[in-house]
Image: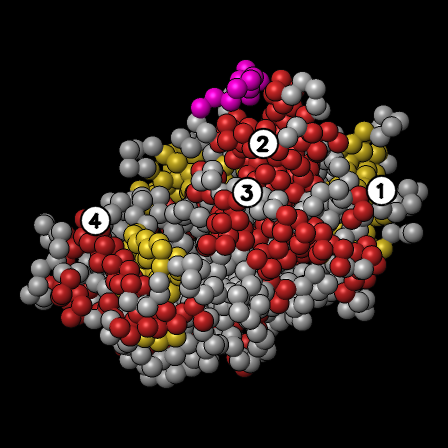
Amino acid sequence: MSMKTQFDMVIIGSGAGGAPIAHELVLAGKSVLVLEKGPLLRYQHEHPRGLSDFKRDEFFATGAEKRLQLEVSNKGRSYYSSHIEPDLNDEPHIYRTADGRDEATIEGYTAQVVGGGTHLYGGVSLRYSPLDFRLRSYNEGRASRLRDDPNGEVVREARDWPITYEQLEPYYCKGERLVGINGTREGQAKMFSADHYQKPLAANPISRYVERGMDALGMCRYRTPLAVITEDHAPSGRKAHDSRTAFVNRYGDPLGLKSSTWACLLGPISRRENFELRANCIVTHLECQNGRVHRVHYRDPGGEPRTVEGKLVVVACSAIESVRLLMLSAEQDEEFRRRIHDSGLLGRYFLTHCFGGAELRLAEDEERYDKSISLDSDWATDFCTNSDFLDEHGLWAGGALYNNTSDQALPLSLARTHRSSDLDTTWDGFLNDVGLTGEGLVDFIRRDFGKRLSMSYMANQVPMRDNRIELHPSVRDKWGRKVAYILKGWHSHDRVVMQVLANQCRAVLERSGARYDQLDWGSADGVNRIANHILGGARFGTDPKDSVLDPDCRAWQLDNLYLTDGSFMPTAGGANPTLTIQANAFRVADHLKERV
Amino acid sequence: MPAHVLLEEDTYVLNHCTRHLARDNTDGRHAFYDTATGFRANVCESWRFPVIDSYYDAALGPDARYAFNEVTFVYFDPTAPAPQSVSVVGTFAPLYERLPMRRIEGTRYFTVSLRVPKGEVYVYKYLVDGQWVLDPINPQETRLDNGERWSRFFTHQCLVPLTFESWEQELLRRLTDHLLPFRTRATRDFIERYLKDMDSATREARFPNAHRLDQSVGVVNFIDKLLAREERHNRDDYKTCIALIADILRQRYPHLPPDQVPRETIVALYDELAGNGSVAGWDYTRYGEPAYFLKLLRRHTLMGAFSHPKYGGNVGAVGWAFLEDSVRHPATGQTLFDWRRSIEQPLGRSEEYRG
């Protein structure tokens, strides 16, 4: 490892928020250091003997049982982390339950690896709808009333983004081109100035039900954009193979066909002299002087303390961890504290998504489908994002609907996600269902395997000031640093959004022509559902009193500090956030190129 | 045979070290792990060391290269002064062969990677500045016949019993048989046919020492290995509960060995364990919550049947083959679980993925 300590740019985090900036600034000739706390796991073609550090192995992806040892109310509970999620005993997220207890959760992490969550995600790469960018002004001007918002909080707390869809649109195009995404533009309700999608693969035959259901409801549909290459991808130099396996969601791809930020943005520049990546290096705090971050403190792979300096510093560790890093820095540095807490909003307006859907089990006499030959999703619709729909249902914002194809497509995932609602309840449903044994297990496999069809929605959560990230008063990580503490609930209007959109998912399945013997629908509405879509906590805006970041995602009072993961978002958007985080990072990169 | 040393990059080794070993905490936060005391109680997943990985060599055919693992040793002890030289000695090479370990620049990690045959148990020690020491990280240890303690590891598809006595294995086999979907005549026939249809050379290459295996799917072996490594902290639960179950079976059938009682008895016992009521004859002073043991057993049994065969169960991928066979299209006979297309050769038939 080089001992160089001065760079034009120091970027903390190598996922969707950090990698686009590194990519662009390196190509612009700037000297760039990326610090990443996780390992640099390689693809087969990158390893000297031709093996990948990612495996198609269900036990590798969700590992052995471990027991929580921290002094929290779920101490002693079992947890199962993957090889690139943090160990809960080392670095937990703590949340407060509805009845006021503190519990550690594995939810709310993306992944700690070069490439971040883009290794593990299903790759759904939707654009946000134009309305998602102006939910304040849209709702202020509306005649129709919002349901279950008696005090008008939704309009009061909604914020327009300081940029419009049209301003971000060229960067969506850039992201789609450089990341490597397959999908179709036709059928999307959003304006596209260019179409860089690769051709989608043949849909899994089970998805024909979803086609029928969407058509019956008059929902314009399109092939879900997925960050997996299906053709040779010139910008990253990757060659296509058949990428359909059930090892998609929660699996890194040993072949590098999934467009993680390492595959598409960092790998291709990794041999350039002006780029340096330090993996296995955790940043502990930032230090400032005269209104600028002037030193970044980190631990090297052996755990030794080091520092580096960057003319510009980008923090992109995923929203919870970025906010935590700034709060930890503020505790050590009075000037940093004064500047970063100036608006009093750091950590406030933390957001996830309203998320849920519907699922059916095909009847005995219906066909079975091999869901292990698929990517994560086949069809999506923007039907629930237009203003007619929102007026009809009294909603403040809409959301995307899409079907899932890789869920429960492998034997262990069938069992461990059976009746579990999140990562904290992995295995619980199966283990509590004591009838699933012997003949019961034969029957379960025969009835469920390859016969489950599901639809999801992803929608905006109402921003609330009290939904926030703090530092936990007592729990410490393995470095002795305070861990993140998440306090979060749902607005009454969120429940309406959840109900309406889960019903739409149900309707698609009901109208799909499928004969079924089970149909369930609902939403992940527990407070522990922090999920992997962690957004907000440092929102951008035009008023320094009402935002943490300026429109370029720069901290208002720290001239060279930028936040470019999902924390900048004032509203969560009605779709999976990764492509928007990437597009925004490309936008910020253009601004940064002018500054160094 | 002399050791086959592999050149491994620093990045690879650090990828396996930092998350687990680099830290400041001294609070024993990983002490839930059965053997975790001292420094070991502070590190995360100490059982991951030495690192056992797949092996690939394009020059060898699928069966030949599949016979090996890559094993990466890491010596690291922050409680002792930084050593000048470290080497490793073990049964994977002649015992007089001291394999020097290199220090990764800028760290206190010493490392060496070797190509080692699969399916075996090995013992080793480190020679640290002239002193013999056990691995301060890896909790697996064994005492040889001469009373000497050695560190231990085992490679993929290992079938050597490490946790259970043979009577425990047999009782566990009967319990897990009841949990699995393999006990009908049709499924038993399928499994026998599947394993028999493979010629013996293929069988030996792909499933080394399969002749040692007397269980149909290898679930008991999977649990044996899991309790020797990843879930060592659940070992006592098994030991205690198997003994308690044997006691109950002896009470109910005083004239039969516990592993030979009629199947109905096992079924009835399962139902008692699964129910909320009490289990007749269970000694609650020795183990308070039999339903908890059943959860462990059910999770482990399912994992054993359907995890990758490298973990010692799902022998010859027979669990996957069973699924493949049980979800065939009624008209065309085509399977609707074509797992082979995405799994490495020789187990599967993927042209790209190498395991």
What residue does disc 2 label?
A: B264
- Residue B90's disc is 1
First in sequence: mark 1 vs mark 2: 1
Q: Position of residue A95 (x, y in %)?
A: 36, 40
CA–CA distance in space, label 3 to label 4: 45 Å
Local secondary structure at mark 3 = loop
Q: Which residue is mark 4?
A: A491
- State the residue lying farthest toward the top: B285
Identify the image quadrant of residue A234: bottom right
Q: Which residue is mark 3?
A: A438
Q: Amino acid at mark 4?
A: His
Q: Residue at x 68, y 51 (%)?
A: B189
Tell me the amino acid under the disc marked 1: Gly
10 Å crowding of disc 2: few (<14), some (14-19), many (20+): few
The alpha-carbon separation of the residues under discs 1 and 2 comes to 47 Å
Element assignment for label 1: strand
